[in-house]
Image: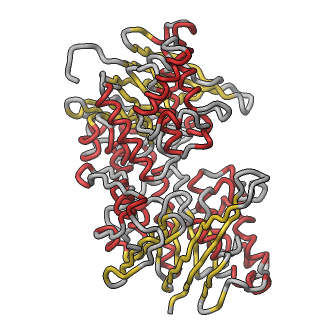
Amino acid sequence: MSLIEVTGLVKTFERRQAPWGRPRLIRAVDRVSVAIDEGETFGLVGESGSGKTTTVRCLLRLIEPTAGSFLFRGEQVFGLPASRMRALRRDMQMIFQDPDSSLNPRMTAGAIVEEGLVIHGIGSPADRRARVRELFEWVGLDAGMAGRFPHEFSGGQRQRVGIARALALAPAFLVADEPVSALDVSIQAQVVNVLMDLQQRFGLTLLLVAHDLRLVRHLCTRLAVMYRGRIVEMGKADAVFHAPAHPYTRALISAMPDPDPAGRQPRIRYDAAAFDPEADLREVETGHWAAT
Amino acid sequence: MNDDRPPLLEVRGLTTEFVSQRTGVRRAVRAVDGVSFEIARGEILALAGESGSGKSVTALSILRLVPPPGRIVSGSIRFEGRDLLALDERDLRRVRGARIGFVFQEPMTALNPVFTVGDQIAEALEVHGVARGAAARARAVELLDTVRIPEPARRARDFPHQLSGGMRQRVLIAAAMACRPPLVMADEPTTALDATIQADILDLLVAMRREHGLSLLLITHDLGIVARVADRVAVMYAGRIVETGPAPGVLASPRHPYTRGLLASLPGQEPGTRLKAIPGAVPDLAALPPGCAFAPRCPDRFEACDGSRPDAYVVSPGRTARCFLHGGAAR
């Protein structure tokens, strides 16, 4: 059974051209359906404004979806009362793009990692301290650094603190929204390795949101490509890369800057007018879907 | 490009320091430390590096726009036969914009929100005495056309917020090229843009070189972008150029362990495997080791690396690496 089963997710925003103007409805996420198996690493790829971040924010109910269904272990998440949602959040955690703004600058790293345990009333103070030490070790930080404040860490270390915080409650489902794009190139690989190790060690179900196709291809078994609020292609990472079926996916792959001169592909441009934005996904081969 | 003319831009031993007073002790940090390179006419040179490597300060130093408390302490910058470090402010203003155009990373902050994009380009032309009035506005439309903005006459009347990020970056490139400068410096010109738009802008820069003989100093942290557009690359680390050479050669067979490490750490080689990360963190310029700045993170470190700073050794014609592995030092 799938751990995550999203069906027909829609999120609309009202936008006014001017304060006195009539509001216009913008469909940021439009009929998105996706199922993710337990222990799978699934990638959500798209450019800015494609709706990928709005999608995951709806799943964690950081914003309220307009329509659709989200079954988590078979339980309907959308519409759950706040009390049940709080309990469920233990199992669904998020790593944010920018460790600088997602960590409270007035709290020590140790307190940031411990906070979730305190909120959910888990363990004695001594248990929690031991847990924080363990989490620091898992993400490759010296436990002696727990008393430091976020600004005393480098960007890569701050993101490790963010990962430790997300793992504190031993979640089954982890959402990572552009977890390394704010980091220096030489640090990105370290953080990616931490994520991969932890994902394997704990059998985490990981939803990776990223614009970097190379990263998604490296980490994910399956992926979905979003374009203007819709999933236009979905399938095994290998299949989507080697035989992209949607014109937008082809354009995106050909635009990837590849440092290997031998791996360079000719640019393929896409013409938004050339494909039907309303087309439904159809199975082009087993497990590989495209909206063509 | 193999002519006998001197290079368009020749930077020698450029050193730029920032003085910090934070703890009451006066300390000078070398953001750029003895940097030398040249750019030929019609050449695209990429300055590649991570944050704090000194690539942006190098570009600002060339324009003599280093913000205080930074200052250029030594070196020479010869551009079109003149030493920019010896020019007075008035002559320098005739170089900035007119002879060296520049494009910065964030297209929204570099444009004035209350003027149309056409007016802003026309203003650049008027300031430099290239054209006035209706002629300047007509030339602005032409420039928008040059950077492949559809319906340029109509777009010239748009305000920056009416344009997409990619279109705004095109406007900035048009503004940088307004006075037909022989050299344009672009600092991370595509970092804020989506992949498909980024590829369009890079294609545009290459086309500008082809059609107008432009030289380009491209500053980027992305080796994929280097591969896509650069003729030559200079890789910077902790204020110094650690490796330089023709871009295809450097990327295909890097000779400095840092360049090699950067390339090996990129995802995409063997999906699903751990990445070959460079250990440690980008160094603090205020606390560099006495020897090679990369030594603490280097897999090939040996005794010589901790003793002194390596020179830029020639590893093959046109290629240098600042690494003792290539200095003939005994291992």
The picture places residue A62, in percent across and down from the top left corner, at: 70, 71
In the displayed structure, B121 sits above or below A217; it is above
Q: Picture quarter containing residue B17?
A: top right
A67 and A241: which one is in front?
A67
Q: Residue at x 53, y 52 (%)?
A: A183
In the displayed structure, B177 sits above or below B297; it is above
The picture places residue B220, in percent across and down from the top left corner, at: 44, 40
Quarter of the image containing the C terminus of chain A? bottom left
A200 and B145: which one is in front?
B145
Residue B25 appears left or right of B151: right
In the displayed structure, A61 sits above or below B211; it is below
A252 and B326: which one is in front?
A252
Q: Picture quarter containing residue B231?
A: top left
Q: Residue at x 48, y 56 (%)?
A: A188
Do we see residue B78 in this rendering?
yes
Q: Residue at x 63, y 57 (%)?
A: A99
Residue A142 appears left or right of A22: left
The image shows a total of numbered marks equal to 0
Q: Residue at x 72, y 84 (%)?
A: A79
Do we see residue A142 in this rendering?
no
